[in-house]
Image: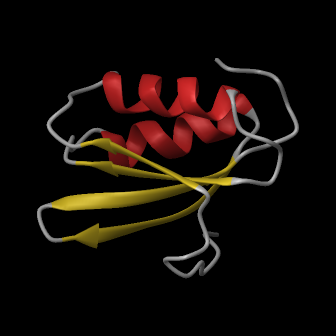
Amino acid sequence: MPEDPQETDWQVAIDARGLLCPLPVLRARKRLLSMQEGEVLAVRATDPAAIVDVPHFCAEAGHTFLDCRDEGDSQLYLIRRGASDQTS
């Protein structure tokens, strides 16, 4: 179950609005590679498939999917960087 992070609870944000599958996840994956374990990435996206793709990516890659919330015409996804170096 997603946690309840506040807006200030992330260290890095990326804007993937206007990008379609698989680009939002690929951008998140690339950014997470340079982050430390426990840091939180915020991803803003408009791709309807991201609601499925982002949690699935987190489960496969060893990250924690924290939250998804609507923000106007886009969604905000919060991901906590896991200890795993898997990036599938």
| Residue at 21% in and 28% down | 20
At a point 55% along the width and 82% down the height, the residue shown is: 6
**Residue 16 locus on image (x, y percent):** 29, 39
**Which of these two is toward me, 71 or 8?**
8
Please tell me which residue is depicted at 56% across the width and 31% down the height of the picture.
Answer: 31
Instruction: State how many labels appear.
Output: 0
Of residues 3 and 42, the one nearer the viewer is 42
Q: Is residue 47 left or right of residue 37?
A: left
- In the image, is 74 to the left or to the right of 77? left
Q: Quadrant of the N terminus?
A: bottom right
Q: Residue at x 36, y 32 (%)?
A: 24
Q: Which quadrant would residue 17 be assigned to in this image?
A: top left
Is 13 situated above or below 76?
above
Above or below, comparing residue 78 to residue 70 in the picture? above
x then y, percent, for residue 77: 44, 56
Colour theme: secondary structure
Q: In terms of image quadrants, where is residue 33?
A: top right
| Quadrant of res 5 | bottom right
Quarter placement of the C terminus: top right
Q: In the image, is 31 to the left or to the right of 25?
A: right
Residue furthest to the right in view is: 83
Instruction: Note whether 4 is above or below 82 in the view shown.
Output: below
Q: Position of residue 12 (x, y in %)?
A: 55, 51
